[in-house]
Image (spheres, rainbow, N blue to C red):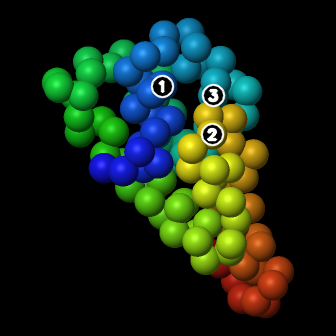
């Protein structure tokens, strides 16, 4: 797994408290699907014991990074930074507006 894929969940799950993770979600920066929130908020046993928990996050990050490549958005803002101002929906809207096609 590259550093950008899974960076937020791996750092957040591994090193930050449950309280910090809950505040992070409430702050509006959680750029993953709603169904992943419980996995992010709940206790994490670490990569050695609970590596499967990070897989959906890393997969979503890969999709997000691919969209960043397609739209020309800076990968720093979409993949590396914890307080991500560019969400997947933003990429979709950019493609919709410029190409005139509906994104699902």
SS at circle 1: helix
Q: Does the CB distance between marks 2 and 1 fall below 8 Å?
A: no
Q: Is residue 90 above or below residue 85?
A: below
Of label 3 and label 1, which has the lower sequence position? Answer: 1
Question: In the drawing, does residue 70 fall left or right of residue 36?
Answer: right
Q: Residue furthest bottom?
A: 100
Estimate the x, y position of residue 62 in percent, counting from the top left: 44, 59
Viewer-nearest residue: 95 or 26 = 95
Q: Quadrant of the C terminus?
A: bottom right
Indicate which label's residue lies in the foreground, 2 or 1: 2
Q: Which residue is mark 1?
A: 12
Residue at the image position 48 percent from the left and 53 percent from the top: 61
- Residue 49 lies, in percent from the top left, at 17, 24
Dot label at residue 81? 2
> Residues at badges 3 and 1 in contact (C-beta under 8 Å)?
no
Instruction: Give the label on residue 25, or none.
Output: 3
């Amino acid at each position: 797994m590259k550093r950008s894929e899974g960076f937020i969940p791996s750092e957040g799950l591994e090193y930050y408290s449950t309280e910090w993770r809950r505040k992070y979600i409430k702050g509006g920066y959680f750029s993953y699907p709603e169904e992943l929130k419980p996995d992010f908020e709940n206790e994490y046993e670490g990569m050695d014991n609970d590596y499967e928990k990070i897989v959906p996050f890393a997969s979503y990050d890969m999709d997000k990074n691919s969209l960043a490549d397609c739209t020309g958005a800076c990968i720093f803002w979409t993949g590396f930074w914890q307080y991500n101002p560019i969400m997947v929906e933003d990429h979709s809207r950019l493609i919709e507006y410029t190409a005139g096609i509906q994104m699902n």
